[in-house]
Image (cartoon, rainbow, N blue to C red):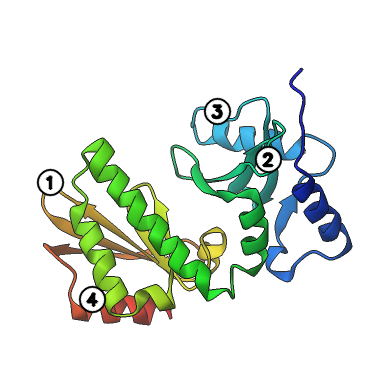
Amino acid sequence: MTKIILPSVYKEFYSRCLVSKPESMIGSDLRTDSDQLNDWAVELLEEIDVKNFLADNDYVFMMHQGYMFWYFKADGNPNPDVYFYHEGRSEPEKEYPLVEFLYNYPNRLSNETNKKKEWDKKVEFYKDLIDNYNWQQAPMLSLIDKFKEIGFWDKYFPSNSHEALGLSTVYDDVRFEKSTVFILYRPNDDTFEVTYLNPARDVIKIETHQNNIGTAEFKKIENWID
């Protein structure tokens, strides 16, 4: 049986949450002494037909609303990387080292610095798709640059669903509690597909734009999200 060695920083964080859980984390389950969250995570992957990527020493320490979870490798590293999985994705996403994650996460809804960090991560995400997988997603990088120019980086949190870029007023894990827009670039016909979702996760409308997204569309996105 694989030995689980928890970092002291996580033990301290969990002890504090037992006394007073941060308001922004209400609705998220933290792992107790049982393997319940790991079991739930595996069940989620099985339900949506995603291959189980969790190793024996991967420790699922938090789950939100049954459709996303966070884990780290509990192998004795005092500051392991945190990975995040969201239903609808084929694989997890690397977040931050645990110390940074535990500092940022409770403050994620109000800390404006986190917006820039998340946007920087999306830039790297699309660069990785382009450079290492030869995906034709350069127009998404140009669109992200335009979003920075018009102030979207300061107003919205970005997220991803596969290669689509999500925009919301809240952090990734609670984005479906607010109106959201997803933008997908389709290289085969050089179009942008913009999907508008309400807080109930219903698709309200889908619009297709040739070549680029202009000022009128930016305003429409703002009106929907705000």
Q: In which quadrant of the rendered view does residue 194 lie?
A: bottom left
Amino acid type of disc 1? Asn
Rounded to the nearest angstrom, the CA distance separating label 3 from label 4 is: 39 Å
Q: Provide the residue designation for mark 4.
A: 217
The image's mark for residue 60 is 2
In which quadrant is the C terminus drawn?
Answer: bottom left
Which comes sooner in the sequence, label 1 or label 4?
A: 1
Which comes sooner in the sequence, label 2 or label 3?
A: 3
In the image, 86: left or right of 100?
left
**Contact check, label 2 and label 4, Cβ < 8 Å:** no
**Contact check, label 1 and label 2, Cβ < 8 Å:** no
Q: Provide the residue designation for mark 3.
A: 52
In the image, 176: left or right of 29?
left
Which comes sooner in the sequence, label 2 or label 4?
A: 2
In the image, 118: left or right of 40?
left
Note whether 149 is above or below 76 in the view shown.
below
Which comes sooner in the sequence, label 3 or label 4?
A: 3
Q: Provide the residue designation for mark 1.
A: 188
Q: Residues within 10 Å of mark 2 (few under 14, many from 20)?
A: many
Pick out the residue farthest to the front: 78
Q: Residues within 10 Å of mark 3 (few under 14, many from 20)?
A: few
Element on which disc 1 rests: loop
Rounded to the nearest angstrom, the CA distance separating label 2 from label 4 is: 40 Å
Element on which disc 3 rests: loop
Rounded to the nearest angstrom, the CA distance separating label 1 from label 4 is: 22 Å
